[in-house]
Image (tube, grey):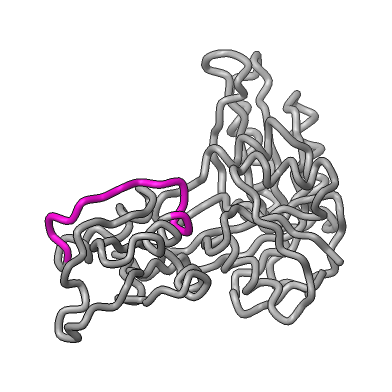
Amino acid sequence: MTRIAFLGPVGTVSQEATRHFFAGETHEFVPCYPISEVFLSTVEGRTDLSVIPIENTIDGSVSLHLDWLVHEVDLPIRAEWIYPSVQNLIGYAGTDPANPYAGIRRIVSIAVAVSQCRNFLGEHLPGVQFEYVSSTAEGVRLVKEHPGEGWAAIGTKLAAELYGLDVLAHNITDHDNNYTRFILAGHYVPQLRESATPKTTILVTLPEDYPGALHQVLSAFAWRRINLSKIESRPTKLRLGSYYFYIDIEASMDSVLLPAAIEEIRAIGCQVRILGSYPSFHDVSTLGRV
């Protein structure tokens, strides 16, 4: 049975997204915490694949997770998918149906979840106290342990189900387009359905003595009409002012044009590392098969 690591504890958006992507299949999903343990479980062979959240519509790239993928491990990207990060108000239902938030004095969650729900909290729970914990699922667990004390959490519907709590308000995020991008990484090669959008992710480090090198890199893709869906600079951690470029490309290494573009980039002295060439599932109803 394929063992798939996700960022735990149980009840996180990562678990919800992983279960959705592999719905209908039989795998063992393994909660790991912190993110280093997710990666290392696969590196050390305790799991076959790792599920990593790397980007969010509202908060952008998850820098810590990208740095682990780039600097700490060598795990090829095997797939990516997009999943809605739906946050809910979770707690014990009160006795007043007209005011389901009566008596809530404390919200237990992570800072990111709280910031994504500011409008709802300001309108319905002004003056509430916040207690920050390591994950939304941990917040739900703590609320479970404090009945009758006016505690509530922000988290997933899955967490509410796992801990036997009530969803007091559904989808309380300020933006309807709050999506998270997940990648599947590991040396194990999964069997996945074909995707309409093949992608390749590379890292490019520019030569120090080549003025205009970034322009040359972009030109290698532009004249071949290869679309770049993302380009982000990140520090190499070697010295101050030294950066590499993380680039997502809407093309496969099996095509004719992309390998030629990469060879052109290398010819001007750039270092290129291919993190993976993989299917991209932007339709969250498309299920992967391992």
| Numbered-mark total | 0
Residue 161 at x, y percent in the picture:
49, 75
Quarter of the image that includes the N terminus: bottom right
- Where residue 283 appears, as percent x and y from the top left, is 60, 75
Residue 116, by quadrant, is: bottom left
Q: Residue at x 72, y 53 (%)?
A: 50
**Quadrant of the drawing holding the C terminus:** bottom right
Q: Nearer the viewer, residue 34 or 142?
A: 142
Q: Quadrant of residue 202?
A: top right
Residue at 52% over, 52% down: 55
Q: Eyeballing the image, is 224 above or below 121? A: above
Q: State the residue at coordinates (51%, 72%).
A: 158
Name the residue at the bottom extreme: 97
Quick one: 260 or 75, which is closer to the camera? 75
Please say whether residue 61 is one of the residues in the magenta stretch: no
The answer to whether residue 128 is magenta is yes
Residue 32 location (% of width, % of height): 65, 50
84 up-or-down from 242: above or below: below
Direction from residue 260 to residue 173 in the image, left or right:
left
Q: Is residue 173 or residue 56 the one in the foreground?
A: 173
The span picked out in magenta is: 125-138
The percent position of residue 152, horizontal first and vertical second, equals: 30, 63
| 257 or 246, nearer to the observer | 246
User: Quarter of the image holding residue 270?
Assistant: top right
